Amino acid sequence: MYERKIYRLAKHITNSDEDAEDVLQETFLKAYEHLDSFLGHSRFYTWLVRIAVNEGLMKLRKRKTDRTVSLDETPEGLEEPVIREIAVWDGSPEKKYSQQELRALLNQAIQNLKPSFRTVFVLRDVEELSTEETAEVLNLSVPAVKSRLLRARLELRERLTAMFKKKGDDVFAYL
Amino acid sequence: MLTCKEFLKELNDYLDDTLDPELRRELEGHAAECPNCWVIFDTSKKTIQIFKGLEPQPLPARVRDRLMAALERKMASKTSAKTRPPGPLTSPQA
């Protein structure tokens, strides 16, 4: 039941099918091996997510292709979120696109986020962990999670609005 | 009345519906007066909804098979470690 969600999470973190496959496997093997150490203080799924996130970040660090893999960096407050796209969406993308097309568009949008924003967004808004659970899994403070989440949401909103907005004069239909 | 910057600062909690009622009313008031902030709120909400609405895809068969095989190997090794008779405590004398 959890394997699909862990695989999706691993793909979002690593941006790679091959790495996600390894992360999935390592996560379940480690969970099986260390089942005794699951103390029940958190939900079992949150415990699995913590293992998967650690495995995923290790993969990213090993690849060293991305210089922004550290979740310890402190991007919050350095720059104001940029808002360029202010337009209503053209109907409902869920109705306009097939699930497959939509998945490809969303994956493309999310892959361009910095890992430190992407991971927070995926845990909060895709895997639906609470702010506190996300902070616990990532060893971040609650304000740091909130700050990164806002940046991630606004950046994704920009990208999706660029794809889904009404075109031409309709772009100002909300005014 | 809130400024647009203050509205953005509270946007997360507004989207998550975790604001106290008074501040929530202030944000609603601002969004009703400021079309730009309203559209940012509306499209942010839709952004979150669209990601939440996507179901995880089934695992590709090859990935699932590889996972199951690895787990079976792990279980087998754990079981055999438990059932293996204890070895001698000291090396046998030649």
Image (cartoon, coloured by chain):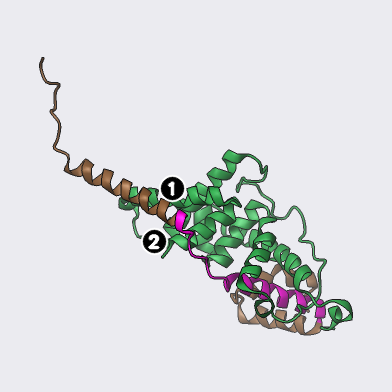
Chain colours: A green, B brown
Q: How far apart are marks 1 and 2 (CA)?
A: 16 Å
Q: Magenta segment: does it hold B22?
A: no
Q: Give the image location of residue A59, x and y in percent.
A: 55, 44
Q: On the rendered image, what quadrant is the C terminus of chain A found in?
A: bottom right
Q: Earlier in the sequence, mark 1 or mark 2?
A: 1
- Asked where in the image residue B88 lies, by quadrant, the reply is top left
Furthest residue in direction front, as rendered:
B62
Residue B70 visible within the image = yes
Mark number for residue A71?
A: none
Q: Give the image location of residue A97, x and y in percent.
A: 67, 75
Image height of B33 relative to A107, above or below = below
Q: How many marks?
A: 2
Q: Name the residue under label 2.
A: A44
Dot in front, 1 or 2: 1
Q: Compare residues A13 and B75 and report the one nearer the observer.
A: B75
Give me the chain letter of mark 1: A
- Asked where in the image residue B8 lies, by quadrant, the reply is bottom right
Q: Mark 2 falls on what kind of element? A: helix
Graded by Cα atoms within 10 Å as few (under 14), some (14 to 19) or many (20 or more), the crowding at tag 2 reads some
Residue A34 visible within the image = no
Q: Mark 1 falls on what kind of element? A: helix
Q: Give the image location of residue A154, x and y in percent.
A: 72, 65
Residue type beneath disc 2 = Phe
At 66% from the left and 49% from the top, the residue drawn is A74
Give me the chain letter of mark 2: A
Give the residues drawn in magenta, as a range: B34-62
Pointers 1 and 2 in contact (C-beta within 8 Å): no
